[in-house]
Amino acid sequence: MAGVILILALTATAALLAAIAQYVFKLHMKRFSFSIGGILNLLLTRQIILGLFIYGTSFIIYLIALGHASLVFVYPAFSSSFIFVMLISAFFLKERISARRAAGLMLIVLGITLIALAQ
């Protein structure tokens, strides 16, 4: 059981970092213009580089989790990133979370729980 908890903790950390990276990307995309110059400028900004670094860190942690557990366990657990994205969107971006989205979030939590209990 301790091994399952460790893998869930690693995967949840990777998912949280991926969600934070998405938040950093979203904040900067308000100033994006779709053109070759805009894309090049975008890729060279500190915010996007920071987001990519956070995303890369998330990926490394995810790989570590994969090295210690099966793909059919780790990948669904990584879907907790949807939970983190929704919470970040609600609290920091002030986006409205509908009842359907909240219900979907609960299904994701239930799915992750069922998969963890099956280990």
Image: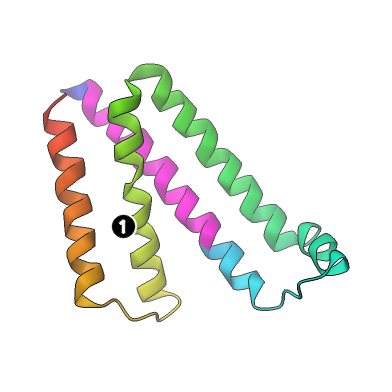
| Residue 47 picture location, percent across and down | 69, 62
| Residue 103 picture location, percent across and down | 17, 65
Query: Does 19 lie within the magenta span?
Result: yes
| Residue 10 picture location, percent across and down | 37, 34
Query: Which quarter of the rendering shows the C terminus?
Result: top left
- The stretch in magenta equals 3-22
Which residue is at a point 11% across and 31% down the rendered structure image?
117
Q: Is residue 46 above or below residue 30?
A: above
| Residue 66 picture location, percent across and down | 41, 24
Q: Is residue 105 above or below residue 108?
A: below
Which residue is at a point 18% across and 34% down the rendered structure image?
115
41 with respect to 15 (left or right): right
Which residue is at a point 40% across and 42% down the rendered structure image?
13
Which residue is at a point 15% across and 23% down the rendered structure image?
1
In the rendered image, the residue lying farthest to the right is 37
Examine the image and state in which quarter residue 91 appears: bottom left
Provide the major secondary structure of the magenta segment.
helix
Examine the image and state in which quarter residue 76 appears: top left
Residue holding disc 1:
83
